[in-house]
Every structure is written in structure tokens, then in C-alpha cells.
Image (tube, rainbow, N blue to C red):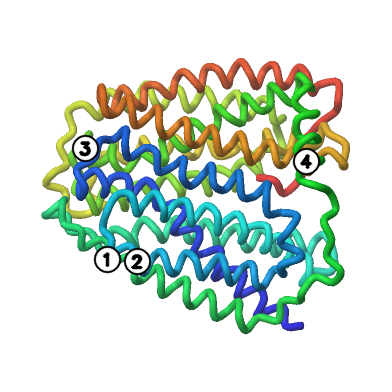
Amino acid sequence: MNPIRITIALACSYFVFAILLNSVGTVILQAINSFDITKTQASVLEGYKDLTIAIVSFIVASFIPRLGYKLAMLVALGLVALMCLLMPSIAQFYAFKVLFAVIGCSFAIMKVSVYSVIGQVTDNANQHSALLNTIEGIFMLGVLSGYWVFSWFIDSSNAQNTAWLNVYYLLALLAGMAFITVLIAPIKVPQKATLRTSQLAAFIDMLTLTYKPLVVIFIISAFLYVLIEQGVGTWLPTFNNQVLKLPVDISIQLASVFAAALALGRLVAGQILRVIGWYSLLLSCLVAMGVLVLLVLPLTHEIDGSQVTSVFDVPFAAYMLPLIGFFMAPLYPLLNSVMLSALAAHQQAAMTGLIVVFSALGGTTGSVITGFIFDKFSGQHAFYLTLIPISLLLISVTLFKKMTVNLGAVPKKGTI
């Protein structure tokens, strides 16, 4: 076995999906401009992606070993490459619904396969953790790259120009290159793969967990967090363009600050947790998020960035709003770590299923609500609305802390 070729295949595949998955905010902005649809209509794209990931992850997890990880990855990459090739010629909004459904379905297959293949090329826990963090780091690099890749194809002088759809030819090429790396990678076929549990049994295990008050509070907290993250992240390019009046390409490039802030926030939090408790860190982050919203949004009312020609020349307030990602970054991995630490090992798989499902529901809800408020009122109103889930999170996290204090649950090292 050649672990280097397998690692390259996993990294290339994840890089492609990082760009595609996180392009939804950019596509929403461009769909509004190019296809003359409302923000409420555009907001459903998040649901086609997130809900498909949740549903397919639950359905296919037990069947992929029988299919074979290599074949599963090739199918996933082949599907997204085909859809990317078709997008410029179709050039209709309905095609984006199909595209993100395919992306969600394919990523669910890819994630299960990648996480399983990592176990084939590592010999111990330290190697496994190191490779997994490397792959996830490549994913974040893809997220950051995606904003700039799309901006290169956008005609900022003509918002309705659909020439930006040509970006999908490039993405199809990248998916094709990833397909080749997987094809030549010596990924082993699982031997005697069997379904360890039925889908009905897995579903019952998940439902059984929801009877625990601790799990209910956690689900609410995770739902609220993802609602905030997707509400802000998905609609930030549109906010930059329609509220701050920045050119479309710069609006999209500036949204990459949010992704960078998320990455930096998790790195910094990992160090801070060495000296303070997880609950104190979460409360501090939530308060900082609320303060940032209250301080920055009033500054955005008088901004007119229509004459800005470079991302380095945008008004100061335009940089400040994406920095909310720095403070929200530690919340999700910390909550997950504390929750999983509080459960027995045999319950963690079912809990992971609940995390995926309710994260998807939170992301879809956040995008739809933000889009509706943005459409009916204003972008400022939509982002001020984040103060409600932030306040509710303060309450739910406090309850979560009280319920875990007697369980001795602590964040696991390396989860931030």
C-alpha cells in the first residue's frame, strides 16, 4: 500500500467538496442578480445541501463498506463532475437545486469513505489524528479558495451576466483530477463487509437518546449555533453587495474573512482551553458575538462601497462583521466534545447521527429565516436577528453546564 497516494487522493477530493459545499452563499448572491429571484426563494438552496447530507449520511453509512470505499468515492466525484459540466448550459435556477442536492448526497458518501480510509493508512491513534487534522485543514483551504475562485469569473460591471457559470467548467476539471487520484490510489476493498446494525436499529438508538434531558439541551444548543453560523455565513456575500454596496466580486472575496476567522478562532481556542474552562470560554464568546453585532451593524448604515476597486480598500466596518466567526468558532466543537464525553462509547455513534441531523436542520432554518428577513425588511434587520439565538444559546449553554457538572464531562484534546 502506498499511503502517500491515498493521502493525496483524500486531500484532493476534500478540497473539491470544500469549494462546492461552501459556494452556496456566493451562488445565492449570483442567483438573485442573474436570475431575478427573491432572497426568500434563493434561501432554499441551503436546505437542498444540508438536508441531503443528513438523510444520505444516515442511509448509506452501513452500505458503503459493501460497495467499497474507492468505488463510492469515484461515484461521488463523478456525479459532481457531471453536474458541474451541465450547469453552464442549463443556466436556470432549478438546476442549482439539483446541483446542491447532488453535492450534499455526494459529500455524505465521500465523508463516510474518507473517514474510513484514513483508518487503512494509519497504525495508531496519533497517526490517525494527525492525518484527519491534515485532511480537515485541506478542507478549510478549499473553503477559503472557493470565494476567490468564484470571484474571478464574475463580471462586477454587469450583475446579470451569467458568464460566471463558466466557473463550473473549472470545478468539473478539479473534480476530474481528484477522480484520477482516487482511481490510481491503492485503496483496499473492505473484506467481508457486513451491516453491523440495521437502519431501523440505528434510528431507534437515536430516538432513545432524545429521552435524555442532557441530549435535548445539547440538540437545542447545536441547532441554535448552526442557525447562526449558516445564517451569517451564507448571506454575508449578499450583505456585502446589497447593504454595503460593494462590487459583487469584492463582496465574495471579503466573505472569505469569515472562513479565515473561523479557522483562526479554533486554533486560538485550543490554546486558551489550556488555562480556562470550556464554560467560561463559551460564555465569553457568546457575549463577544452579541457585542460585535451591536457595535458593527450601526456602522454599516451609511456605507457606500460602490467605488471600491480592491478588497484592501473596503471600509473598516466591512472587515469587522465577518470577525464574528472568530468568536463563534469554538462553540460547535466544544459542545460536541462535551456531549460525546458525557456518553458511553456505545452511544456515541447514535449521538453523532443526531448531531448531523440537527446541524442540517439548524443550517437550513438559519438560511431561510435570514433570507426572509433580508427580503422583507433589510440586511441589518436580518443580522440583528442573530441576537435572539445568541441569547437563547446563553441560556441553553448554562443549562448544559449544570447538567454535565456532575458527569465530569470535559472537552477532548484536539477537538478544537
Q: Which of 202 and 316 is in front in this view?
A: 202
| Residue occupying the point 78% across, 44% down | 349
State how far apart marks 1 and 3 are (Cα): 28 Å
Q: Could you tell which of marks 2 and 3 lies nearer the N-terminus?
A: 2
Residue 365, above or below 234: above
Q: Position of residue 372 (x, y in %)?
A: 33, 27
The residue at which mark 2 appears reads as 86
- Under mark 2, the amino acid is Leu
Element at label 1: helix
* Classed neighbour count for the residue bearing mark 2: other residues with Cα under 10 Å, few (<14), some (14–19), many (≥20): some
- Under mark 1, the amino acid is Ser
State how far apart marks 2 and 3 are (Cα): 29 Å
Q: Could you tell which of marks 4 and 3 lies nearer the N-terminus?
A: 4
Q: In this view, does 311 lie to the left or right of 97?
A: left
Q: Which of marks 2 and 3 is in front?
A: 2
- Under mark 4, the amino acid is Leu
Disc ID at residue 200:
4
Quadrant, the C terminus? top right
Q: Could you tell which of marks 4 and 1 lies nearer the N-terminus?
A: 1
Quadrant, the N terminus? bottom right
Residue 79, above or below 26: below
State how far apart marks 2 and 4 are (Cα): 37 Å
